[in-house]
Image (cartoon, rainbow, N blue to C red):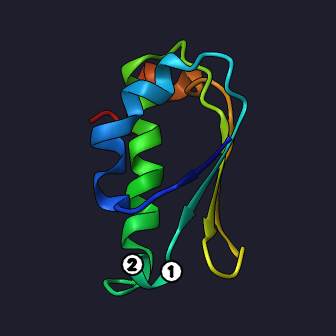
């Protein structure tokens, strides 16, 4: 599935619950504008998107997160990849990345 993300800062807040209900989703490409994500500290919004997915994994340790690629909408450049699958067991056991 490919999603065109207009506001990366708010993506998780408004859309993560919907993605988590899509249990059979295995791959997701998020298209973002590099200008939107690079104006402040270079990777602020990319890191925010990654954090949204990590928090969702912690919220539901059984959720199989799809493999996510964050891509520049104009160039197709891969900005980040979030591996698919459930939260690693050690995250759950030691509380790492807990919201």
Distance from Cα at disc 2 to Cα at disc 1: 5 Å
* Residue 53 against residue 94 in the figure, above or below: below
Q: Residues within 10 Å of mark 2 (few under 14, many from 20)?
A: some
> Could you tell me which residue is drawn at 27 percent across and 35 percent down?
99
Q: Residue at x 36, y 71 (%)?
A: 44
Of the pair 31 and 89, the residue shown nearer to us = 31
Tell me the residue at 35%/87% (across/down).
39
The local secondary structure at tag 1 comes to helix
Quadrant in which the N terminus is drawn? top right
Residue contact between numbered discs 2 and 1, judged by CB atoms under 8 Å: yes
Q: Which residue is mark 2?
A: 36
Residue extending farthest top: 62
- Residue 96 visible in rendering: no
Residue labelled with disc 1: 34
Residue 96 horizontal side relative to residue 61, left or right: left
Q: Is residue 82 left or right of residue 93?
A: right
**Residue 78 location, quadrant:** bottom right
* On screen, residue 93 above or below 29: above
Q: Is residue 51 visible?
A: yes
Report helix, strand or loop for mark 2: helix
């Amino acid at each position: 599935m490919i999603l065109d993300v207009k506001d990366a800062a708010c993506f998780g807040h408004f859309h993560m619950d919907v993605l988590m209900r899509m249990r059979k989703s295995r791959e997701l490409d998020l298209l973002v504008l590099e200008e939107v994500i690079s104006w402040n500290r270079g990777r602020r919004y990319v890191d925010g998107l990654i954090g949204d997915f990590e928090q969702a994994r912690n919220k539901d340790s059984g959720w199989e997160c799809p493999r996510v690629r964050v891509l520049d909408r104009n160039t197709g450049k891969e900005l980040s990849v979030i591996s698919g699958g459930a939260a690693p067991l050690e995250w759950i056991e030691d509380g790492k990345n807990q919201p």
